[in-house]
Amino acid sequence: MVSVMEVVKVGIADMKIAAAPQTIRTSGLGSCVGVVIYDEFKKIAGLVHVMLPDSHLGKGGADLNKAKFADTGIEYLRESLLKCGCDSYRLKAKIAGGSQMFHFSSQSDVMRIGPRNAEAVKSELQRFNITLVAEDIGGSSGRTIEFDPETFILHVRTVNKGAAEI
């Protein structure tokens, strides 16, 4: 018998949930951060593709895309996992991305989007007491990540640098 694994694809500024034997993947992580939060007992994982650190940078109101921002996306993902039966005390996280894709002569903090995204994601994980188990952050290359809720391995493919498992 041949089994075919289903891959749940997460777009930019998007959030989805997957359960084993599914895997969950996002591509195009440059300055964005891919945040995987999972429950090992339930073998359920969610992934949010965060583009910006703070929702105050967006339009706000009813049209706010919660998955786009670290300060709203982490909470949105956590709530979605809890609705799927996950327990908050068992949630763990792995993150990747946060590259500085472009170099500017200015030292302005505004242009440090990748590092600011990574800092905001870590702050939100800490706010909800979600243990950060592993990270592949920084550099200047794009990444694609895929998480397997069965093995809890995050596969990271980095442009011009190959693949890794964290």
Image (tube, rainbow, N blue to C red):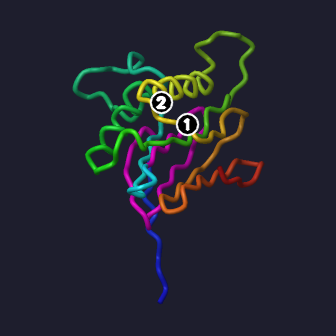
The magenta-colored residue range is 11-38
Checking the image for residue 104, the label placed there is: none
Q: Pointer 1: what residue?
A: 132
Q: Residues within 10 Å of mark 2 (few under 14, many from 20)?
A: many
Question: As drawn, is 117 to the left or to the right of 59?
Answer: right
User: Residue 95: x percent and y percent?
Assistant: 57, 40
Q: Pointer 2: what residue?
A: 125
Q: Nearer the viewer, residue 101 or 158?
A: 158
Secondary structure of the residue carrying tag 1 is strand
Asked if the residue under mark 2 is in contact with the one under mark 1, i.e. CB atoms within 8 Å, the reply is yes
The answer to which image quadrant residue 65 occupies is top left
* Amino acid at dot 1: Leu
Q: Residue at x 71, y 48 (%)?
A: 159
Determine if the magenta segment contains residue 144. Answer: no
User: Residue 150: x percent and y percent?
Assistant: 49, 62
Question: As drawn, is 20 to the left or to the right of 138?
Answer: left
Q: Residue at x 40, y 39 (%)?
A: 89
Q: CA distance from mark 1 to mark 2?
A: 7 Å
